[in-house]
Image (cartoon, rainbow, N blue to C red):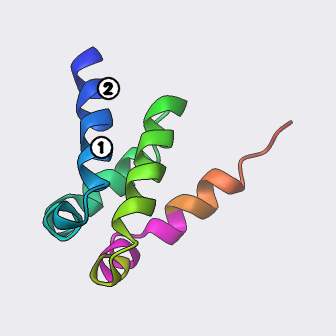
Amino acid sequence: MESRKNAEATLFRLSLADENKIIIGSVMIPEIVDLLEHEYPREKIYAAKTLFSLCLKHGNKGRAIRATIVAALVKILSVDEA
C-alpha cells in the first residue's frame, strides 16, 4: 500500500515537467482517472492533481475526456453529505 502511495506521488511530480506531460498522458490517463474512484482520499487528491497537470497540454484533454474523467468528477462532486 505504501509503495502505491509513493508511486502516485512520484507520478504527480513527474507530470509537472512539460517534457513528461505527453509521455505520461499518452499511456497513463485512463489509469489515473480510475484512481479518482478509489476510496482513499489521498489517492483521489494525487489523481486529481496529476490529471490537472497533464491536461495543461492540449493533447491530453481529449485523452482525459475519452477516459471518462467527466463522469468520475461528477460522481465525486455528487456524493451525498448526509
* Residue 13 sits in quarter: top left
Question: Where, by quadrant of the figure, is residue 56 drawn?
Answer: bottom left
Instruction: Please report contact status of discs 1 and 2: CB closer than 8 Å, yes or no.
Output: no
Give the percent coordinates (x, y) of residue 41.
Answer: 54, 32
Query: Callout 2: helix, strand or loop?
Result: helix
In the image, the segment drawn in magenta is: 62-71
Q: Is residue 70 left or right of residue 22?
A: right
Task: Indicate whether 67 appears above or below 8.
Answer: below
Could you tell me what secondary structure mostly forms the magenta stretch? helix
Residue 3's place in the image compared with 49, above or below, is: above
Q: Is residue 65 magenta?
A: yes
Q: Which residue lies furthest to the right in this view?
A: 82
**Residue 48 position within the rendered picture, expressed as x and y whole percent measured from the top left:** 47, 51
Q: Residue at x 62, y 63 (%)?
A: 74
Question: Badge 2 is on which residue?
Answer: 5
In the image, residue 55 lies in the stretch drawn in magenta:
no
The amino acid type of the residue labelled 1 equals: Arg
Rendering coords of residue 18 (x, y %):
25, 66
Q: Which residue is found at the position 45% from the left and 67% from the top?
A: 69
Give me the disc on residue 53: none
* Residue in front for this viewpoint, 48 or 77: 48
Quarter of the image with the C terminus in it: top right
Name the residue that disc number 1 marks: 13
Residue drawn 51% across and 60% down?
72
Of the residues tagged 1 and 2, which is closer to the observer?
1
Q: Indicate left or right for 63 with 52 as reference.
A: left
| Residue 30, position as x, y percentages in the image | 28, 61
Determine the residue positioned at 32% across, 54% down.
Answer: 16
Q: Is mark 1 on a helix, strand or loop?
A: helix
